[in-house]
Image (tube, rainbow, N blue to C red):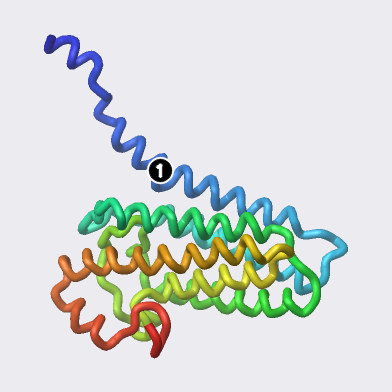
Amino acid sequence: MADITTDTAAPAWTPWALHLLGSRVIPSFVFTLLGVLTLLAVGQDESVAQMLFHVASALMWGMFLVLVNIRPAPLRRGRAPIGVIAALSAQFAFIAVGALATDSAGGSRVWIADILLLGGLAFSIVSVLALGRCFGVLPDVRGLVTRGPYRIVRHPLYLGELVSAFGLVIGASRPGLAGAAWIACVAVQVVRTRYEEAGLRAEFPEYDEYAEHTRRLIPGVV
């Protein structure tokens, strides 16, 4: 019986390979695909606003491609089922917004979309520079950051992402479905932040004092 068990056991590298596939390979493929599709949507008969819309969208997907591949190992892994589901659902909802907003509308609506896209993207980049390699997808703890945009809100990267995604919704030729996906993204992001903060509180006792004086997602509101 021992020989049979040994022969049929999963190789030692299997968990590592599955983790690599789920945490880096698949997200990298999806973000690359969305970026390429967005750039391919740039047409010669487009207005300047529409062209900016597609280029800014591609830059956003490129940012996520880089972020998902520079993460170090976490200090504390958050594996609460609801937290993991919320984190993954946020990614899928965000990807759904992008997929549903590949075709842009015309007129002044695209200019508004460009402002939101570029503004949210710029805020996200500043947040990433402050965050460094503490970026993560699942509610894992890689460090405590309270500088830069993190002095304004506790989750500035998510705020920048949501603003950019809302720009995608505004500029989409069919904003209805994209808007529904964006609302779902907001809902699961709020749930996601709660589980991330539970891990931060467990790892860093000073987090409570920081959270007491800093809003979660929207300055002066929430």
Image coordinates for residue 147, horizontal then vertical, percent: 33, 81
Judge whether 177 appears above or below 129 on screen.
above
Residue appearing at x 24%, y 85% in the figure: 212
Mark 1 Cα shell of 10 Å, populated few (<14), some (14-19), many (≥20): few
Q: Which residue is mark 1?
A: 22
**Residue 150 figure quarter:** bottom left
Q: Quadrant of the C terminus?
A: bottom left
Amino acid marked by disc 1:
Gly
Judge whether 105 appears above or below 62 on screen.
below
**Residue 216 figure quarter:** bottom left
> Would you say residue 58 is visible in this rendering?
no
Which residue occupies the extreme right position in the image? 45
> Would you say residue 131 is visible in this rendering?
yes
Image coordinates for residue 153, horizontal then vertical, percent: 37, 81
Q: Quadrant of the N terminus?
A: top left
Left or right of residue 214, residue 218 in this image: right
Image coordinates for residue 26, horizontal then vertical, percent: 48, 44
Left or right of residue 23, residue 2 in this image: left
Q: How many marks?
A: 1
Image coordinates for residue 80, horizontal then vertical, percent: 25, 54
Residue appearing at x 73%, y 74% in the figure: 110
Residue appearing at x 40%, y 43% in the figure: 22
Left or right of residue 118, residue 17 in this image: left
In the image, 96 versus 156, the foreground residue is 96
User: Which secondary structure, mark 1?
Assistant: helix
